[in-house]
Every structure is written in C-alpha cells, then in structure tokens.
C-alpha cells in the first residue's frame, strides 16, 4: 500500500505542535472536510470504528486514515472493542456493537478536541474507571467556555448517550 506523505502529521500533532491558536474559520473548514470524508465512508456502507485525532492526517487538508478496523455498516454482531477509549461510544463499551452513530460520537469528541485544542479527558487516567464513568455516569469531556454555542450544541448532540439522538453525518 502506498500513501501520500502528510508533512503535518496527525490532527493530534497539528493541534499540539501549533504554537498559536488555530483560527476558527480554519477549524470549521477542516471539520467540514473530515465530516465529508466520513460521509463518503458511510455512503459506501462502511463504519470507520476508530475515528480519533491520531487517525486524521494533515497535508494542508485533513485525510481520514487507518481503515484497518473499518467494516460493513450492516454487521450487527457483537465484537471486541478496539480504539482509543475517549473516542469510543458508550454503547460500544457496553454492548460491543458498532454503528454509523458510533462514528458520529467519535466525531463529536474529535470536534471538541480540535475546537478546544485539548486532548479529551487529559486530566483523568484512561482506564476502566473512565469507561465506567462514560457508560454509567454520562461523563464527557469539558467543552471550552470559548466554544460558540452552535458548536457546543452540535458537539453535545454528537456525543448524546442515546445513539438514535445523534445527527447523521449528512446532518453535520
């Protein structure tokens, strides 16, 4: 497999190596491009299953990468949980079932991380206790006070506890 070299690394690298605040217009554009990539994946009948800032590569524009866990959206079997805990939807942590809505949850976490420029749950160990708090107590990352209400509302909808309440990627 041959891939394009992305000189800016991952979104995580891009965020944390940026010495200055990344302007909102650029963030909006990047998030829109990521959502369009996710729309393409979902329209293809697939689920990414491992969407997080380490799997978004940058070379002036974002690219969704690491399709190693990608699978058919029609696969309803229980499966092992893979991925980075802060980005995994509660229903996956509880039931081990991935759907398109689980990618939307991950996108909401990613969106909040990019807007706030803070890694999700950066002050909490990523362990079993975090998993329990996400599933049973509805714990979510803090939304920065500087986040415009429109984005804060969208982030909150994306990581809603009930998968059926989350927007579709088309609605993003």
Image (tube, rainbow, N blue to C red):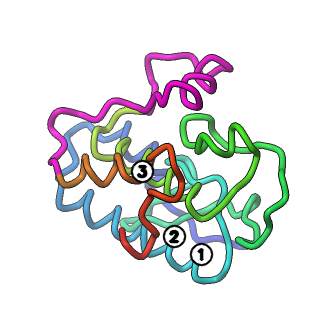
Q: Which residue is mark 3?
A: 108
Give the SS element for disc 1: helix
Which disc is residue 169 wearing? Answer: none
Residue at 44 percent of width and 44 percent of height: 109
Taking the magenta stretch, the answer to whether it contains residue 139 is yes
Which disc is residue 41 wearing? Answer: 1
Q: Earlier in the sequence, mark 1 or mark 3?
A: 1
Q: Earlier in the sequence, mark 2 or mark 3?
A: 2
Q: Is residue 138 left or right of residue 115?
A: right
Residue at 22 percent of width and 48 percent of height: 22
Give the SS element for disc 3: helix
Label 2 or label 3, whichever lies nearer to me, is 3
Which disc is residue 38 wearing? Answer: 2
Q: Count residues near mark 2 (Cα–Cα under 10 Å), then give few for <14, some for 14-19, many for 20+.
A: many
* Image location (x, y in percent) of residue 56: 51, 57
Give the SS element for disc 2: helix
Q: Quadrant of residue 65?
A: bottom right
Extent of the magenta region: 120-149
| Magenta stretch, overall SS | loop
* Image location (x, y in percent) of residue 51: 57, 54
Q: CB of mark 1 within 8 Å of CB of mark 2?
A: yes
* Image location (x, y in percent) of residue 39: 50, 76
Taking the magenta stretch, the answer to whether it contains residue 94 is no
Q: Is residue 171 left or right of residue 127?
A: left
Q: Nearer the viewer, residue 149 or 1?
A: 149
Residue at 15 percent of width and 48 percent of height: 148
Q: CA distance from mark 1 to mark 2?
A: 5 Å
Q: Count residues near mark 1 (Cα–Cα under 10 Å), then give few for <14, some for 14-19, many for 20+.
A: many
* Image location (x, y in percent) of residue 162: 51, 49
């Amino acid at each position: 497999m041959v891939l394009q070299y992305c000189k800016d690394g991952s979104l995580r690298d891009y965020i944390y190596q940026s010495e200055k605040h990344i302007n909102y217009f650029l963030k909006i554009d990047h998030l829109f491009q990521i959502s369009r990539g996710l729309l393409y994946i979902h329209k293809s009948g697939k689920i990414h299953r491992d969407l997080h800032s380490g799997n978004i590569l940058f070379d002036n524009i974002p690219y969704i990468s690491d399709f190693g866990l990608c699978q058919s959206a029609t696969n309803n079997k229980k499966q092992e949980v893979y991925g980075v805990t802060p980005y995994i939807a509660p229903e996956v942590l509880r039931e081990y079932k991935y759907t398109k809505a689980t990618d939307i949850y991950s996108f909401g976490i990613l969106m909040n991380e990019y807007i706030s420029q803070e890694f999700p749950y950066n002050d909490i160990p990523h362990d079993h206790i975090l998993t329990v708090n996400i599933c049973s107590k509805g714990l979510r990352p803090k939304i920065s006070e500087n986040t415009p209400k429109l984005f804060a509302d969208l982030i909150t909808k994306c990581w809603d506890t009930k998968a059926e309440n989350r927007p579709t990627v088309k609605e993003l």
